[in-house]
Amino acid sequence: MIQIDDVVVSLDVLREKFLCDLKACKGECCIEGDAGAPVEFEEIEKLEEVLPVIWDDLAPEAQAVINKQGVVYTDQEGDLVTSIVNNKDCVFTCYAPDGTCYCAIEKAYRAGKVNFCKPVSCALYPIRVGNYGPYKAVNYHRWNVCKAAVLLGQKENLPVYKFLKEPLIRKFGEDWYAELEIAVEELKKQGYLK
């Protein structure tokens, strides 16, 4: 592990390779699991602000869940997460004609209709950030759903931290990311990383 400011980073984030392969996985991470995506408190307002823009892209079942309980709920572990449909699909999930899942918020963002991309936890996946008192822990989350992304990342030799450069900067800032890159170079010199 390395530490930058109050953030402890697992070496797996630096060693493991990853590159999303949407053609292979069809966006399964948006519809599998036992809870929604983690949401930061400040993001709730942003999720509510984008609703009028993306409402028509959402499934009727998702609209009903949002009308009943809102865009987020507290899961069994006490974490704030996106609301889900039928105990699996994120309410912001939409489907392309070929069955691929995508995020309605990200679609609107890429079209220039909203200025919020999606919850940072979604953008950071397969990284999960845990809060441990005065420290945050940045860990690599392994999930069989992402097997194709691991294979493509290995083929392209793309480490997780490089694949997720933009969301890591969004979460921790440009200066923090620059320090991470310096730490990686030092670990390479010492033989801990290739």
Image (cartoon, rainbow, N blue to C red):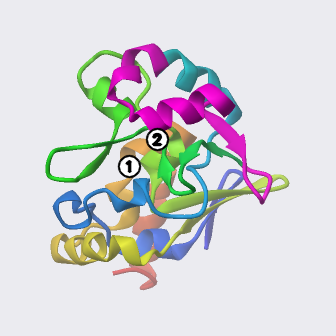
Q: Is residue 30 left or right of residue 97?
A: right
Where residue 143 appears, x then y in whole percent?
Answer: 45, 74
The residues colored magenta run 51-79
**Residue 162 in the image: x percent, y percent?**
34, 57
Q: Residue at left 59%, top 63%?
A: 34
Q: Is 194 placed above or below 45 here?
A: below
Q: Tell me, yes or no, if residue 173 can be seen here.
A: no
Regarding mark 1 in the picture, which secondary structure is present there? helix
Give the crowd class for mark 1: few <14, some 14-19, many >=20 residues within 10 Å: some
List the residue tagged with mark 1: 165
Question: Label 2 belongs to which residue?
Answer: 169
- Amino acid type of disc 2? Ile
Is there a contact, CB below 8 Å, between mark 2 and mark 1? yes
Of 37 and 86, the residue lying toward us: 86
Q: Is residue 63 magenta?
A: yes
The image quarter containing residue 95 is top left
Relative to 177, 38 lies left or right: right
Q: Quadrant of the C terminus?
A: bottom left
User: Residue extending furthest right?
Assistant: 133
Circle 2: is it few (<14), some (14-19), or many (20+) Cα within 10 Å? some
- Across and down, in percent, residue 62 comes to 48, 37
Relative height, residue 188 to residue 33 (above, below): below
Quarter of the image with the N terminus in it:
bottom right
Q: Tell me, yes or no, whether the highlighted magenta stretch contains residue 192.
A: no
Question: Which sits in the foreground, 28 or 41?
Answer: 28
